[in-house]
Amino acid sequence: MYDAIVIGARCAGSPVGMLLARRGHRVLVVDRATFPSDTVSTHYIQQRGLARLAAWGLLDELVATGVPAIKHMTVSYRDIVIAGFADAINGIDVTYAPRRTVLDQILVNGARAAGAEVREGFAVRELIFEDGKVVGIRGAAADGEVREEHARIVIGADGRNSFVADAVGAQRYHEVPAECFVYYSYFSGLRTDFHSRIGVGEQIGIWPTHDDRTLVAVMRKAEAMPEFRADVEGNFHAIARAIVPEFAEELATHGKREDRFHPMRYPDNYYRQSYGPGWALVGDAGYHKDPLTGLGISDAFEYAQLLADRVHDGLSGDVPMADALAEYQRERDAKSHSSFEFTCSISTLELTPQLHAVFRALGGDARYAKDFFAMIGGGMTGEEFFAPERMAKLLGASA
């Protein structure tokens, strides 16, 4: 009998398992994948996410893998360019965009080192219910042997197509339709910092990752996907030429594509009911938004910590588990609200008149641009950055 079973061992699942095990709980973490293995990802970890890794004692291990530090960011909307970087946040003055083959292995190792049992290559086939409460799982390893395990709580950290969410009938709320699709690949021969550049109905993202590779991603509106797929490479380079012609020239003359193009056709933005009798959801299983702002990994870390804290409260008997899990969902929704709304707004690739005015002002004021990057990095909330008095000063200074 385990205290907790976690289904999914990537950016949300392994941290939850690790944190609960560190508090003395008996934890099983399972994943159908084996590690190291890749997964579709934005790669990017903001300063707040890196601060979590530092607090968990895992950041130095990531840095030691040779992932390049990012110390300058350029964000643009058509002719408006905002460049700079945030001051240190919780002592972190850089950001990173690691390959998931590297990051996820570090997280899995962290869970094992904490004392959690981790079973790779284990596919969960069903949840076990007793009197309407989830009490365990039934699944099989690669050899086909069916095993049944029981726990006081089962946590779904199994992504946006969550098996756990489907099995318990977790309902979505606050849904916002997805706007775009993404294609990305890895190139050698390039030298660049972080770029997120929006043109007319399209976007390009550029940032360095492991092995002297640069991740280059392009985005267009969902209805353009059939046309794009007819000539992926040609359209990929066309977006680069339209938005950042100087980079497009470097990409064409010095860049060598080292991998296939990876498509991402994301589902709608949503929150899911993330707890019930004997179960909880974390990561994209419980809350998902468009990849444009690259917040997924940092959010997975932050809300993994929050869920682990609340589950510990329930397991220890300090708070009834149902109350502890309700508080987890309430806190998660409150803390993520502003970034969710900002992401849904900007991922249309069309700024509202209000946001357009803000971006225009930020492009001409380095002081407020630093605050903008602090909001992106997690050193300032959206409510703080967009506070009426701050916006009045910013827009007044640009008038």
Image: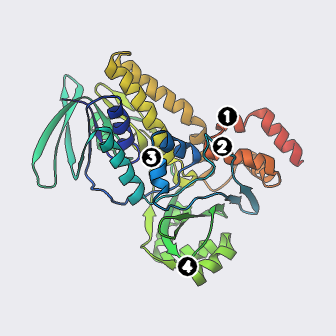
Give the residue drawn at x 60%, y 76%: 238
What's the distance in space between the residues labelled 4 and 3, CA to CA? 32 Å
Instruction: Tell me the element at label 2.
Output: helix
Quadrant including the N terminus: top left
Query: Separation of disc 2 and disc 3 at Cα?
Result: 24 Å
Q: Kindly identify which residue carries mark 2.
A: 375
The mark found on residue 58 in the picture is 3
Quick one: 391 or 67, which is closer to the camera?
Answer: 67
Can residue 176 be seen here? Answer: no
The amino acid type, in three-letter code, at marker 1 is Glu
Q: CA distance from mark 1 to mark 4?
A: 40 Å
Q: Is residue 7 left or right of residue 354?
A: left
Q: Amino acid at mark 2?
A: Met
Of the two numbered discs 1 and 2 in the rendering, the one whose residue sits closer to the viewer? 2
- Taking depth in this image into account, of 218 and 45 the one nearest to the observer is 45
Q: Which residue is mark 1?
A: 383
Dot 4: within a 10 Å radius of its alpha carbon, few (fewer than 14), some, or many (20 or more) residues? Answer: some
- The image quadrant that residue 48 belongs to is top right
Q: Position of residue 78 (x, y in %)?
A: 72, 62
**Residue 10, how many percent across, how many down?**
37, 48
Residue 96 in the image: x percent, y percent?
Answer: 54, 56
Mark 2 neighbour density, 10 Å: few (under 14) some (14–19) many (20 or more): some
- Pinpoint residue 114: horizontal percent, then vertical percent: 33, 39
Separation (CA) of disc 3 from disc 1: 30 Å
* Residue that label 4 marks: 255
